[in-house]
Amino acid sequence: MSLSPGVGLLALLMVVQADAPAPPTSPAAPNGVAVRPPAAAVAPPPSRSRRASPSASVEDLWNRSVRAEVAGDLEEAGRLLGEIRRLRIERNIDTLETIGLGLVARGVAHLDAGARDEAETAFGRAVELAPGLPDGQCGRASVLLKGGPLGVVPSLEAMASGLVAFLSTARGQLRSSVLLVAGGLLAAFLVLWALSLTLLIRHGGLLWHDLEEWLGPSQSRSASLALFLLAVLLPLAAFQGWGWLPLWWLAILFPYFSRAEKLVSVAALAGTLAVGPALEMIERWEVTARNPLYRAAVAAVEGEPDPREAAVLEAAAIADPEDRDLAYLLGSAWRRSGRVDSAAALYRELLTRDPADAVARNNLANLEFAHGRYESALERYREGAEAGGAPEVAATSFYNLSIAHLEKFEYQAFNEAKANADRLAASRVAAYDRWKYESGDYAVVDMGLSGDDVWTKFAGVGDGVGARNVWAGGVAPGAPVGLGSLANRFTAAALILVLVALGVSLLRGSKAFTVHCSRCGTPFCRHCHLGNVVGELCSQCHHLFVVRDGVSGPARNRKMQDVQAREARRSRLFRVLSVVSPGAGHLYARQTFLGVALVTAWYSVIAGLVIMHVMPLTEVSSRLTPPWWWVLLGATLVVIWVLANRLRPEFDVGLPKGSKSRRLRAGQGG
């Protein structure tokens, strides 16, 4: 009897749960009907000495191991852990997190009791069975650190290995992405404050001078000061919030900046356009992480799903039988949890609907291989290798074919199949070698969705799926973060600030460039001194230091006192800025790019410390975490601070080109 698309799978799932350890009813089954699997879809192989059945539950083996250890039977406990290790490789399970946490707890108990060797053994087993769990490596780092100074470097290496392994998991990638973007936004905000505040200190007097000239001599100095404060604090007066002050300062002071300062300011204003997409990305990540179906899918491709996660996948597969991705994920979840009969029946039904289904054919062959039915598995592997299609799919079939021949001691056929696999996808085949037993034997490899495929399927969706049939090339209906995320207040604010900067430039005119005298620091307008001013020197400093005539003795003395006072003030301000905010002093000294580099490095580390404190990257207990990352980040801050305060600039005086006078440097002479 032929079945219409989806009906066969739906009918199978409605009767495929009787011998499973999962709950007796499925939340997606209509009217509470129990979902029961067929009995004995795959016959077990001839029993090997004390080897666990391919349908054994890893959780059950772990419970038996714990009971054996409590009873003092350490040999049996070790044998059961070896079976868990074998089943993990046989089922291609990346990490057994629950068992890893149990072993970590065992290691902590040994560590508290002073049994370092036993603790290191427990942590080592945790790393072996749950490599994506950083707790095991952190425990090893704590044990190694107790070995004295010689254990410092191995402890650091263990911590780094744990972090790298965690970042390779779906949860690690998602969490690190959120923290990286959040930390980047915080660092950018702090850098923006340091940049704008320093430039306000340097150029704010010029704006005040222009406002005084605009008001005219009839107005008091307090009136110009009040107008200056209103101009500087306008976002607060308009109830827009203090967070807009840095960008506002860059806009109203933009005409006074040097070329390098303008370039940095333009980059800062343009950077506000990235705030909207960054926030939308964080929101998408958070929404995806809360999706129970996404979490169940991740467990199905990386770990061993618990009965609740398997039930979530089962309900989704029943609700949408046309989405084969859900069937693949359910089959993987069932096999990893020991429900091999249910998984085999599911793959057979998929092959009934589509005999060319590469995933179902390969994974069913793997189940037959695990039960010792090598001839049937060989036939399916040959069909997959000869079916064509994507090179990676054919390479996987050839690879599994080679393992099946090796199991039968057919070495020539093994070499031929392995060579074909390497020819089609050498890098993919090389990655398969990680599924290797301690005895040197290899495990056959399942096909199905990867971690990236799972993310593509559920990205930005809080419930259900965002894309159907991703493995077969499906496309998500929802658009990714793009131009739509630019329609926000940050983009509008950037446009307004650009208009403000242009408006201030037009109001000042093409000749009215107010500058600080590079020697005495007096603000003056070139338009007012046109004809006397050369370079960035006021008329008196020009005559005093360049022409060297036309200045009376008392005027010369007063001017020299002004110069000395300005140099002392500039030097003090540089020291204060460099101590409080390394790099800000160099911004004040017009070493713009060096200052930006130092400020960015300083506040990036600070943002990292804040983010790590508020939202830790991992969930490892502080009991097992040596403070290496805090030490490294603290040492980095010290290096940046020392570097910023040692690289003291020489404040150049811009004399006119062609002058025979030597170039004066304010930093000389103390």
Image: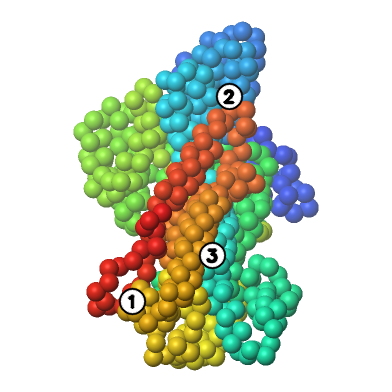
Tell me the residue that label 1 is attached to: 548
Which quadrant would the N terminus be assigned to in this image?
bottom right
Q: Which mark is residue 198?
A: 3
Q: Give, as a three-letter code, the residue at label 2.
A: Leu
How many residues crowd around disc 2 within 10 Å: few (fewer than 14), some, or many (20 or more)?
many
Earlier residue among tags 2 and 3: 2
Residue 132 visible somewhere in the drawing: no
Q: Nearer the viewer, mark 2 or mark 3?
A: 3
Earlier residue among tags 1 and 3: 3
Residue 80: x %, y % from top left:
54, 19
Q: Give, as a three-letter code, the residue at label 3.
A: Thr
Circle 3 SS class: helix
Residue 595: x %, y % from top left:
44, 60
Q: Residue at x 39, y 59 (%)?
A: 667
Tell me the residue that label 2 is attached to: 103
Which quadrant would the C terminus be assigned to in this image?
bottom left
- Distance of label 1 from label 3 (alpha carbons): 34 Å
Tally of marks: 3
How many residues crowd around disc 1 within 10 Å: few (fewer than 14), some, or many (20 or more)?
few
